[in-house]
Image: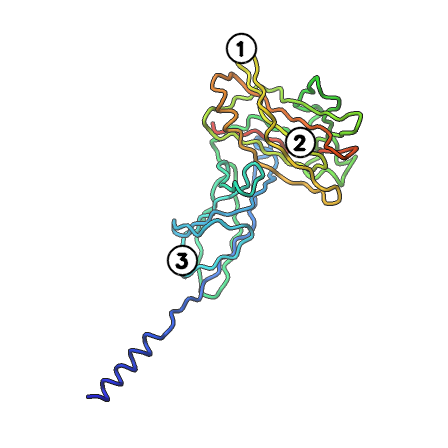
Amino acid sequence: MNKIYLFSLTILLLTSCKKEDNTPSWLIVNDFTLTTDEGTQGANTHAITDAWIYLDNEALGVWSLPAKIPVLDEGEHTLLVYPGIKMNGISATRTRYPFYNKFETTVNLVKDTEVSVTPTTTYKSNLQFQFIEDFEQVGVQFDKDAVSDTNIVIVTSSQQPDIVKYGNGCGAIYLSETDSVFKAQTNTNLNLPVGEDVYVEIDYMNTNSIALNVIAENSTGIAEHPPVFIINPQDESEMKWKKIYINLIDDVSYEINATSFELYLISILDKDITSGVIYLDNIKVIRYQ
């Protein structure tokens, strides 16, 4: 009896000491690609930095892209990937971009094996592109303000092929000690909703800071909001094209009696420099229908 008891106890101890198999399956999520209808939605540039990931509707977290994610599961699963951005260019305000569609697919996970997906997205169908300036036409959809002593001009790919990255042209603002102030606004009477997301998308490359906000128009006049959205300058030796998504919801929603809006840009030559340049492209103002 004692031998049987000891044998049974030994088996129980061995069984209880056996380690669980925590070998993960590996999910590789590559960078997003964006497809647009260029005629109505503009260029397909994006700055999707993050992925909000769900597996069978259970959150796996928010991951910087590209991501390698351990999953303690295997077999077939439904994968949802939502495009994430840095709202207003701030890392602390990472959010899903509400105007991009989610990516959905089925993945077959295998333990200790990598499964790779490259998510794709498009703009949602229920959007209004209130404004698109891609600097591909002869004129520019910004009016120079009276305080401005310089203007935005079009630079073509034939003139500066090392500068123009998208299409055949981009906008350029040149600042100097004699032409040190730039200010201009759209001239399209933007129809923007109160209490809903309104985003400005801008591609930029700059050695001088530039700021923007809205001008509200109503029956009694205009109200120009302070230029609180600031795009900081880049070091000239490391200057490259970047993209920013700016949410105007608070400033637009403040103006409940506004009949229309304009977007304005302003830049003053930064301190301790004698010249600066700001290149802009693919400026969009987007809202829900």
Lower position in the chain sequence, tag 2 or tag 3 = 3
For badge 3, the amino acid type reads Glu
In this view, 80 is above or below 110 = above
How far is mark 3 from mark 1, CA to CA?
Answer: 61 Å
Q: Residues within 10 Å of mark 3 (few under 14, many from 20)?
A: few
Give the residue drawn at x 75%, y 26%.
180
Which of the two discs, 2 and 3, sits closer to the camera? 2
Residue holding disc 3:
76
For badge 1, the amino acid type reads Thr
Q: Is 48 in front, or is 132?
A: 48
Horizontal and vertical percent for residue 42? 60, 33
How far is mark 1 from mark 2, CA to CA?
Answer: 29 Å
Residue holding disc 2:
210
Q: Are the residues tagged 1 and 2 within 8 Å (C-beta)?
A: no
Q: Secondary structure at mark 1?
A: loop
In this view, 123 is above or below 144 = below
Q: In the image, is 220 to the left or to the right of 156? A: left
Which of the two discs, 3 and 1, sits closer to the camera? 1
Residue 86 found in image quarter: top right
Of all residues, the one furthest to the top in this rendering is 220
Horizontal and vertical percent for residue 231? 64, 35
Q: Is 23 in front, or is 234?
A: 234
Give the residue drawn at x 60%, y 39%.
44
Give the residue drawn at x 77%, y 35%.
273
Q: In the image, is 26 to the left or to the right of 278? A: left
Residue holding disc 1:
220
Lower position in the chain sequence, tag 3 or tag 1 = 3
Q: Secondary structure at mark 2?
A: strand
Q: Residues within 10 Å of mark 2 (few under 14, many from 20)?
A: many
Q: Secondary structure at mark 3?
A: strand
For badge 2, the amino acid type reads Ile
